[in-house]
Amino acid sequence: MSYFTSISYSDGPGLDAFGRLRTSDPATLFEVSTQYDLDPIQMQAGASGSAGITPSYITNQRLVQLQTTAGTGSSFYQSYQYLPYYSGKSQLIYFTGSFNDTGVTGSVVDIGYQDLYNGIIYRQNGTGGVQWVKRSSTSGSVVETVASQSNWNIDNLSGAGGTLNPSGLTLNANQSFIGFIDLQFLGMGRVRVGFDINGLVVPVHQFTWANQSGPYPYMQSGTLPISMVINSNASTNTKTAYFKCATVLSECGADDTLSYSFQTPNISVIAASGSRTQLVSIQPQSTFNGSLNRSLFELQGISLVNVGSNPVYWELAIGASFSGGTTYTPISGSYSAFQYASGLTYSNLTNGCVIESGYVSGSGQASTSFLISDRIPISLDRYGNQQPFGTLTLLLTGLGGSSTVYGTISYNEIR
């Protein structure tokens, strides 16, 4: 005998951004834990203006310290990689850190899933308290929708209890925090934000859009980086904040089969005996079809044919330097977001490193399939410029003599 015709669950953290019961194993798209250093391969640390100080690593606490002095400027810590949003899947972001104090007049601290133009942000607004913010550039300029703590529409964490504070918890905004963002993008979806307090996941506010807020998306993209920024505007005092960890999860997994597959043209070069010779380099185009390029690069493999008699040692490297001019050509015309260059004069790897290597026998061939770590982003920097580790280069060295080698690099890109 059946006693139940249906089972329903009330809205809460047990349901993902699309109202599904959280029972699936999420796919980790990104993770940073600052365990040993600033993690400079996958994170950009920088500063601007007279007040900005480049973030530093605090060894004992294993934290990243951001700081601005009196004056105007910024200090920022941001992932190079923008993390792809998969339509119809909940994007779940966790981040930890500390605002360190109750605020400094003229200094604003933002942390969350954000860049300069779009994002969902947990903010300390000077001495004016904490806020959750939705940033959007769909109007052509940056517009922010700000919800101060007293206006949070799920739980204001005031400690007063009642309908405005159903958890009964009090937010200590100057203490360390575990924040979360539960993103239903699709351009028109809902965003829930909140905190993990004493092991309890507590949503505090939601931004809603569909069926009420006009014909356009609430942000330009759900593909964004992790970032913490201090912006000081004529501040009279030093402001310090700390970043510890962050992760971005795609609930119900990620679909690599939805990427676009490309490869570089067939290129030949004479691998010089005993010294490195560049075969091909790949980097992102600055823009793709008129928009700032934030595509994700996934290496699939390399294919080499050695038509010479001497064996060749090959290396995949990031951060290689070249002398003379460098000219890059878009791959596959207007269809790929990446570009390649060949015929460059190799200089050094002083500020780079080798991430894969192998051998090709004389009069032989090698086809190698592998994925490089997502911690090695072939991407642009915070401002849309080429960054030191954002170019992947295939280098060849002839062993016992020179050899002519043909080769290609295959890759996927996710937008």
Image (spheres, rainbow, N blue to C red):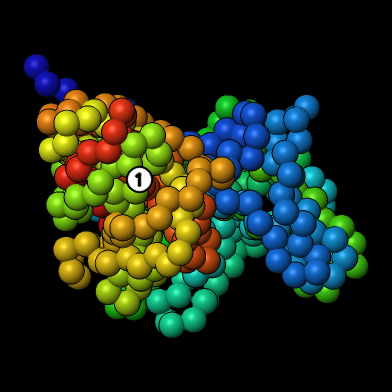
Question: Where's the N terminus, which quadrant?
Answer: top left
Question: Where's the C terminus, which quadrant?
Answer: bottom left
Using the rendered view, name the quadrant where residue 305 is placed. top left
Q: Is residue 161 at least partly visible in the picture?
A: no
Numbered circles on residues, count:
1
Q: Residue at x 90, y 62 (%)?
A: 237
Using the image as rendered, state which of residue 220 and residue 82 is in the foreground: 82
Q: Which residue is mark 1?
A: 277
Is residue 212 shown above or below 129? below
Classify residue 9 as left or right of residue 100: left
Is residue 138 shown above or below 97? below
- Residue lying at the far bottom in this picture: please name it: 140
Q: Residue at x 36, y 31 (%)?
A: 356
- Residue lying at the far left in this picture: please name it: 1
List x then y, in percent, for residue 192. 46, 51
Q: Residue at x 22, y 30 (%)?
A: 310
Q: Residue at x 70, y 36 (%)?
A: 63
Using the image as rendered, state which of residue 264 and residue 322 is in the foreground: 322
- Residue lying at the far top in this picture: please name it: 1
Is residue 82 shown above or below 178? below
List x then y, in percent, for residue 234. 83, 74
Classify residue 102 as left or right of residue 26: right
List x then y, in percent, for residue 273. 34, 36
Q: Is residue 122 at least partly visible in the picture?
A: yes
Classify residue 121 as left or right of residue 219: right
Q: Secondary structure at mark 1?
A: strand
Using the image as rendered, state which of residue 11 and residue 63 is in the foreground: 63
- Please tell me how crowded label 1 is: few (under 14), some (14-19), or many (20+) other residues with Cα within 10 Å: many
Classify residue 346 as left or right of residue 96: left
| Amino acid carrying mark 1 in the image | Thr
